[in-house]
Amino acid sequence: MINHHRRRRRHHHHHHLIFLTAVLLSLAPSEPDIRTGYRVTVAIPPAYVPGFVGRAYLMEAGGGGGRSPSFKVALSAEASGGGNYSCSLEVFLGDVKVWSSGHSSRFYVEDRCALELAADGDLRLKGPDERIGWRTGTSGQAVERLQIQGTGNLVLVDASDRIKWQSFNFPTDVMLWGQRLSGATRLTSYPANSTSFYSFEIERNRVALYLNHGRFKYSYWGFAPSLSRNITFVKLGTGGLDLFNYKYKKIARITAPRSEPPRFLALDNRTGNMGLYYYSPIEAKFAVSFLALNATCDLPMSCPPYGICTLSSACSCIRLTRKLDGAGLDCGEGISGGFCGGAGRPAMEMIELDGVDSVIKDGPKRVNLSKEECTSLCSGDCDCAAALYSSRLRECYLYGIVIGIKQVVRGSGLSYLVKVPKGSRGRRGRSGLKKWVMVLVGVVDGLILVAVVGGLGYYLIRKRRKTTALRAGNGS
C-alpha cells in the first residue's frame, strides 16, 4: 500500500507514508525541492524479510534528455542481515548509489523510518518513538529547502540560496563530476565480512589507495605529480581526475582515455580498485574508462588471508589445508591476533617464503637491518603477523595481517616471513618448505578481473578486450 499526499501549502506539515511488504522499489512523485515541515515515512514489515528494500524517491535533477541518467534522492529501508533493517537517505545516479547517509555508520530501525526537514532547519532520520539516528545539525541556520543540484550535490539552502550543508562535504565511496576532495577528506569503502577497509586519500605529494587494518594502513597504489609538486585538492573534470596546487593551478591529471567525460570515480568495496566511469548511451549503462590496477594479483585482497596469488592469477595457500567453505578457499584456518601464542593459543614460529612479494606497503618499516634482525623484530611483536625483507635495500616491512601476497620471479632479493603455529613445517623442516608452500594450488581463482561499482553488485567492469572492442565500434 502506497499513500502519497501532495503538499498544498508551504507552511503545512506534510507526511508521506510508504509501506512495502515485498522486495520492490516505490516511486513517490518527484518534487523540485523539499521545504521545512516536510516528512516522509517508509514502513517496514513486522517480520524480517531477507533482501527487503523499501525506497521512496523524493526528488530528481540533472536528467540528460535520455542520453544520461538523472540524479534521484531517496529514503531507503533495507534488510541489512542479522535480522536488522537500516534506514538511510541516499542519492542515485540512475541505478548507481553515489551517496548515503549510512555509508560509515548505519541507523538500525524497527517498524518504520522517517525523514523530516524540521521547522528549525535540521534534516533528520528518525525511527520509532522519534529516535534520531542521523541529522545534518543545521538547526537555527535559517534553512528553508532541501535540493538536489545538477551535479548530484544534495544541499540545504536558506532563502538566498546560500548553502548551509552539502553532501559533497561528506564523501562516501564515490566522487562525482565537478566534486572536489582535499587532504582533509577521503573516499572509504567497506568490504563485506571484513575488519579491514579501503580508502582513497589525497596526500601532500601524491594520491594513494590504502588498505586500513587496525591502527595501521598499507598503500597498494599511488600517483604523484612530476617534480614533487604539492597537491592541495583534486577535482573530477571532463578529462579525468585533475590535481591542483594551492594556487588553483592544475599540476597533473589521471586521464580517462575516452571522448565521453567521466561521470564518477568509484572505490570498489570488493577489490579495492579505483576506477573512472562514463555513461555509454549505446549500451545504456556505465562502463569503466580507467582502472588504477589492471592485474588481478596487484589487488590487495585478490586471495584470502594466508593465500598467495600465483603467476597464473590463481590462489595457493601458505597453510597446509584444503578446507573449503561457502566463501571459497580458507587458507588461514582462523588464525587472527595473538601472534605470540599465549593462553589457549599454539606457540608460533617464523617461516620464510622465497619468490613472493607483498602488494601492500607503507606500514611500519625499519631500515639497515639483516634478515635475522627483521625476523626477530616480527617474532617478538605480538601484533606482527608477517614481514617482508629486501636484502638489496636492507628494509623490513612489518604487517599485522597476512594479505596481498603475490608470486614473483625468484632472485628478486625479497623474503616474506610469516608466523605459523609451531610444527607446521613438519618433519621435512626447512628443506621441505618449497614443496609445502606451492603444492596446494587452490581451486579458487584469484579475485575476479572485473570490479563491482561501489558494492552495488549491478554494474560490472568490462574486461579490457571488451572495452577495446567498444572503442573500435565508436571509432575512438
Image (spheres, rainbow, N blue to C red):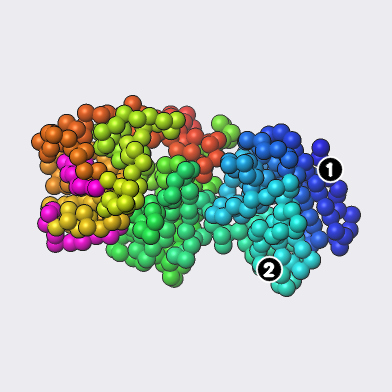
**Which percent across, then down, holds residue 329?**
36, 32
Quadrant position of residue 67: top right
Which residue carries the number 1 mark?
3
Apparent side of residue 28 relative to residue 390 in the rendered image (left or right):
right
Which residue carries the number 2 mark?
138
Residue at the extreme front: 343
Apparent side of residue 2 relative to residue 56 in the rendered image (left or right):
right
Work out which quarter of the rendered image holds the N terminus and state it: top right
Q: Is residue 351 above or below residue 38?
A: above
State the SS at label 2.
loop
Apparent side of residue 374 relative to residue 238 in the rendered image (left or right):
left
Q: Is residue 110 above or below residue 155?
A: above
Apparent side of residue 409 relative to residue 269 in the rendered image (left or right):
left
**Which percent across, then down, holds residue 204?**
37, 66
Front-lying residue, 75 or 264: 75
**Which percent across, then down, holds residue 442?**
31, 29
Q: Is residue 323 above or below residue 381?
A: above
In this rendering, does residue 188 appear at all?
yes
**Which percent across, then down, holds residue 42?**
74, 46
Residue located at (32% from left, 36% from top): 331
The question of residue 294 being in magenta is answered with no
Residue at the extreme right: 8
Say which mark, if any, is on residue 112.
none
Label 2 crowd (10 A; few <14 / some 14-19 / many >=20)? some
Work out which quarter of the rendered image holds the C terminus and state it: top left
Residue located at (75% from left, 44% from top): 43
How many callouts does the rendering have?
2
Label 1 crowd (10 A; few <14 / some 14-19 / many >=20)? few
Front-lying residue, 118 or 316: 316
Magenta residue span: 347-372
